[in-house]
Image (cartoon, grey):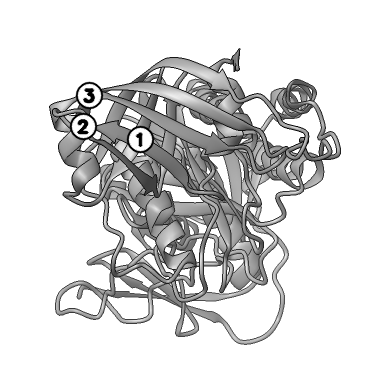
Amino acid sequence: MTGAQLDEVRPCLEGVIPAMMATCASDGTPNVAYLSQVYYVDTQHVALSFQFFNKTRQNLLANPRSTLLVLNPVNAVFYRLHLRYLRTETEGPVFESMKAQLAGIASHTGMADVFRLLGSDIHEVIEVERVAQTPLSEPLPTPPPRPHPLAVLRRASVRLSAACSLGALLDATLDTLEQELAMRHAMVLILDPTTQRLYTVASRGYATSGVGSEIALGDGVIGVAARERTPVRIVHMASAYLYSRAMRDSLVSAGSGPAGTDIPYPGLPEPRSQMAVPLLSADRVIGVLFVEGSQDLQFGYEDEDMLVALGGQLGAAIDLMQEAEGACDEVPVPASTNAAPATSGGPPLHVRHYRSNHSVFVNHTYLIKGVAGAILWKLLQDRERNGRHEFTNRELRLDASLRLPDVADNLEARLWLLHRRLAEQCPQLRIQKTGRGCFRFEALGAVQLEEVAA
């Protein structure tokens, strides 16, 4: 037996091979049982899944000391962990992450109706032993080396630091995931603090971008990561398991606006691995960085560590970019730039705006809603009434009709979302950035406006 650190054991905690747990009753009777899940909390603690009121649970409450045997699936090395039970958590980041991961494992094994997490048992790790190998249990060959995470993070940091706009920042992030980490299916979502919903502002690897699609806080892997401010990683999934699919609200109910205002979520139809990390800045949730793949065990704990570090820089960069846009949006606009752009022939665009939720339809096809919809309606009205084409972020922030939140209005993200939706769905209308805090709005043709109160 040789000593080891808990970080060395992390590959054993991916749920590939069940752990074996030994406990002892108050009268000294031993008990050994398989355990569904061992969760790495930090360098001194692990959390074990509490699912059943069984003998193991009774023994822990009577005698908090236990022993755990785990196996590294990569090199077939066994480790023995000596633990001391501290407490059981039934809510919070650790519980929610374990709940999501356990659901994936249960689905993978066809036990979704049986496995249900009752709590997360937090244990202090007293000692870690590396079990000596025997001649018949030689370690497996070392897997091929992966890119050094610090080198990847350094290159990612250079990319993000060079970005001068939100669009460039998002592209730099998705480029890093795809080119450096082979994460080809990814999304970035921003949290709307008013509606408590996350909306997609960028994606990579899907048939449709899904920009503008929404997920409620707490729904699915993405919503849980944002609500609990913790990474959520699932590496065992089945096609029938729908934990990843957020239950999006319908706007068909009376008084909530017209039907058909739900942009399709762009996720994989049958994901096998998923990971979501919250984007944090100044102790606020900015959004979520999400990746998924079509293979089991596609993302390991090193990938999680990498995405948490990348997400931290991305969240801070988005926040700083919002502040920079707000500080530099009083640039005067020369009168000559308000000249009307060239227009194309053809029938006019018919734009209908529903005042109840600011949803906007172009030629009877849904485009956008919410604050971004309200911004588009303001731009169209100013263009029609005053012939304007040049605008600043500042005037949008001062417009009470848009109902931007006083703090963290995410205006730049909303403008970027509107820019992307117009480019994809209505290229006759376009927004072009002309400077920091300034943009130009153009309509390449005649436009008919209609407003509906309901």
Residue at the spot 35% in from the left edge and 22% down from the top edge: 83
Between 113 and 202, the one nearer to me in the picture = 113
In the image, what residue type sits under mark 2?
Leu
Residue at the spot 48% in from the left edge and 34% down from the top edge: 69
Categorize mark 2 by other alpha carbons within 10 Å: few (<14), some (14-19), many (20+).
many
Residue 399 seen in the current view: no
User: Mark 1 highlights which residue?
Assistant: 22
Categorize mark 1 by other alpha carbons within 10 Å: few (<14), some (14-19), many (20+).
some
Cα distance in 3D space between marks 2 and 3: 5 Å
User: Mark 3 highlights which residue?
Assistant: 64
Left or right, residue 76 beside residue 26: right
Q: Which element carries disc 1, helix, strand or loop? A: strand
Cα distance in 3D space between marks 2 and 1: 10 Å
Q: Which element carries disc 2, helix, strand or loop? A: helix
Q: Say which mark, if any, is on residue 60.
A: 2
Between 355 and 186, the one nearer to me in the picture = 186
Residue 251 position by quadrant = bottom left
Relative height, residue 3 to residue 349 (above, below): above
Residue 65 position by quadrant = top left
Q: Position of residue 289 (x, y in %)?
A: 54, 43
Q: Nearer the viewer, mark 1 or mark 3?
A: 1
Q: Are marks 2 and 3 in contact (CB under 8 Å)?
A: yes
Left or right, residue 98 beside residue 328: left
Residue at the spot 60% in from the left edge and 33% down from the top edge: 78
Q: Position of residue 396 (x, y in %)?
A: 40, 41
Between 420 and 182, the one nearer to me in the picture = 182
